[in-house]
Image (cartoon, rainbow, N blue to C red):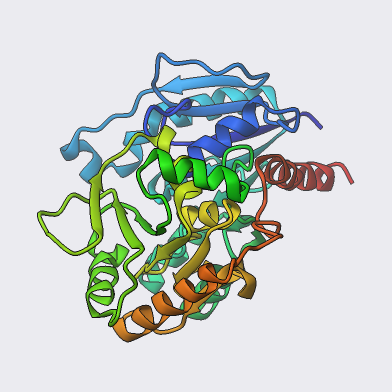
Amino acid sequence: MKTSKIIITEQPIPFAKNGSWTQRIEYFLKSDFNNIDHFICGKTNESLVSKTHFFKVSQFKNRIINKFFPDFRFKNYIDVLNDLFKENDHLIICVIDNIKLKNTISDWIEIKKLKNHVTLIFYNCGYSYFLEDLENKKFLKNIDEMIFLTKSAYQFNKNKYSELTPEISVLNNPIDKNKFHPISKSDKEIILKKYNFENKIVYLWLSHDREKKGLDIVLNAWKDWANKPKNVELLIVGANRNLKIENVHFLGQISTDLVNEYYKLTHVYLFPTLWKEGFGLSLSQAICSGCFCIAADNGGVSDFFLPENGILIKNPNQVENWKDSYQKSYLEIENNWQNNNSGNQILDYEEWSKKFAAIFNKWHKRLNL
């Protein structure tokens, strides 16, 4: 049986903007684990060195047409699939994190009566789409397997909906451990001196300044921290508020190339997420970098946060919990806290690539039994 393994994304690959899943997909496509025959993605002039054959297609984004003919937006994607099906007996298709694109492909399967000739995998790169039950039934139609980032995301969606019919895999996000790793005490002293934080204990919040990212909680807890030691500094990266708070530094946006350096500078990382976090990329980067972490137990965080990583806050909306955690973390750092197994529980890119490839190989093997 002639089979083609295909990945389909709305975003172009390579992707010019930052994005966790686009970065790992690019790594995978360049790696020795790559087992994808064809990749269908958005239009781009950029190229990627890969053995996979790329189809870079444009979308139809006329609002009026798409309102009445929603599948027309991805017509060029379907045209490529039609051509590939002419050359193959079976297509194994993975759609990444796009419900509308998946539904268009599902409609194509129905119209062409291809259910026995297409295996459809959907990669959920968040926590839940929080659909209404009827919407979710439409979304699940023709999906043979769904990939979740965490077990807790799977459990949440299993409990939320009256039906969850696909086979399920759980594949945690990976971290580039060549960039995000602990450094020695002497190296940390060098980088602290570089940023004029000698003999200081540095706390870090790093995110986009959105309400759900919990910056207000962090700042209010900092203000309420009674008898605050004189040698603590709080760095706020990604926000540039016009506020003056003692020992708080608003640094605004920084280059992505400097992110790993700020983790190495940091003693205590703050992750006060107030929404159902899909995985918590910055938190996992901080853990791998050897930071003591204070994190909200929200979404998929508890799947990879171990007791030795720091403090996991069950009720993150209560400022008192953060204030108390600041004091506890300070005492831990003063007593030379370190995690000798920083990030061992988190996948690196190579481990993730191997597991991702195995999903396609599993379905390919089943077709030939």
Query: Can you give x and y, in whole percent of width and height, for residue 125 in the image?
Result: 49, 53
**Does residue 130 lie above or below 35 as drawn?**
below
Of the pair 87 and 283, the residue shown nearer to us: 283
Residue 92 seen in render:
yes
Where the N terminus falls, by quadrant?
A: top right
Q: Of all residues shown, which one is farthest toward the left?
A: 242
Query: Can you give x and y, in whole percent of width and height, for residue 98 in the image?
Result: 42, 47
State the count of labels: 0
Q: Of all residues shown, which one is farthest toward the right?
A: 369
Among the 4 quarters of the image, the one containing residue 109: top right
Query: Can you give x and y, in whole percent of width and height, for residue 284 in the image?
Result: 54, 56
Residue 164 seen in render:
no
Q: In the picture provided, is 340 more to the left or to the right than 27?
A: right
Please name the residue shown 31% across and 54% down the image.
235
Please name the residue shown 45% across and 21% down the image.
56
Query: Can you give x and y, in whole percent of width and height, for residue 62 in the image?
Result: 20, 33
Please name the residue shown 52% across and 67% down the image.
333
Q: In the picture provided, is 70 more to the left or to the right than 312?
A: left
**Does residue 207 lie above or below 32 as drawn?**
below
Of the pair 45 and 190, the residue shown nearer to us: 190
Among the 4 quarters of the image, the one containing residue 138: bottom left
**Does residue 312 lie above or below 120 as drawn?**
below
Of the pair 145 and 129, the residue shown nearer to us: 129
Of the pair 72 and 286, the residue shown nearer to us: 286
